[in-house]
Amino acid sequence: MRPARKCRKSAGSSTPEGRKTIEPFVSRLDRTRPVLIAGPTASGKSALALAAADRLGGPVVNADALQVYADWRILTARPSPEDEARAPHRLYGHVPGDRPYSVGDWLRDLAPLLSGPPPVIVGGTGLYFTALTEGLAQIPPTPDAIRAEALRRIETEGADSLLAELDAATASRIDRRNPMRIQRAWEVLRATRRGLADWQDDTPPPLLPLHRAQPVLIDAPKDWLNPRIAARFDAMLAEGALDEARRNAPGWRPDLPSAKAIGAAELITHVRGELTIDAAREAAITATRQYAKRQRSWFRARMKGWEVRAAKDLNSGPAGASNEARRT
């Protein structure tokens, strides 16, 4: 395995090079409106968010569905203690790893934070941002028995068996390559006898319409991003991701909500002696790159009204070598 690279734990905007690349953008932000920062994993969102929070005076708020969980701090690239000391951070690591946490839960937790100093909402979960700025359908909770049936069928038959039973409108709208989205759509149809698309068409007004915010989408092409993904995973290993996996291994199950953390399954398999560290590393990096590809596809399809900024213009240093390598 290539030697893991040590890196700073604070975001790269604290360096002179980082400030030089970020300050021209941050200096023109309106201090009265929330800032939304979306982008694929490892694209430099956190450094930009910290700089924006310095200007607005509000908290940095998580909009990443994996970073809400308490049990994978390093592997999900949650902010470091140094970052948290620089600005208040909210909705990071506040959910136990065995507790389901929906988009609706996130919106409810976020709502009180919109009444104080303008927050900087940052993350890579596109569904969170679209729910925030376009609204979220008020779908009843899924009964435990139906969720258990969905999980059982995915395990024994695969997600495609559920996809085949969806109504046409929903099947054409969801991400067919994402088993979680397929499962959710099937559960809604099974529980309410009404397709997810139909519920979405009855969506109430959004919590934060896009025109009341300052939305920024970081564009990170594959060739620029892939080396950073590899460098960041090596940095995670250097900072203790394997120790984190060892702590989680005794109670880890693939159906836990937090088990979807990218790289978790690979590192757990390694610490259980079933996979070499080299193979685990390569598999985790590949999974992260595939995840980033899905994120970019979502952003292109659903965030057409956002201001697009090139990642290379907001990050200093060569790809993968930034001080901000472990940050999101």
Image (spheres, grey):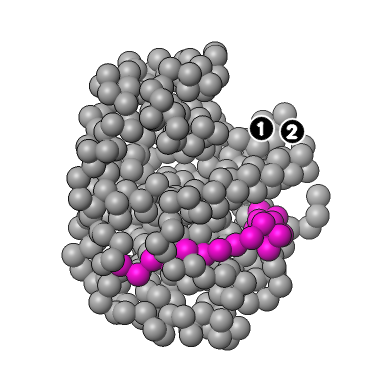
Tell me which amino acid carries mark 2: Leu
Query: Residue 219: within the magenta?
Result: yes
Front-lying residue, 200 or 117: 200
Identify the residue position indicated by label 2 in the image.
275
- Tell me the quarter of the picture where residue 245 sits: top right
Sooner in the amino-acid sequence: mark 2 or mark 1:
1
Q: What number of labels is visible?
A: 2
Tell me which amino acid carries mark 1: Thr
Q: Residue at x 72, y 29 (%)?
A: 274
Above or below — where is 219 with respect to 63?
below
Q: Residue furthest right?
A: 1
How packed is label 2: few (under 14 Cα within 10 Å), some, or many (20 or more)?
some
For the residues bearing labels 2 and 1, Cβ distance under 8 angstroms: yes
Q: Residue at x 37, y 74 (%)?
A: 53
* Element at label 1: helix
Label annotation for residue 269: 1
Marks 2/1: CA–CA distance: 6 Å
Q: Is residue 154 visible?
A: no
Front-lying residue, 5 or 155: 155
Left or right of 198 in this view: 255: right
Above or below — where is 238 with respect to 191?
below
* Element at label 2: loop
Left or right of 178 in this view: 55: left
How packed is label 1: few (under 14 Cα within 10 Å), some, or many (20 or more)?
some
From which residue to which does the magenta span run?
213-233
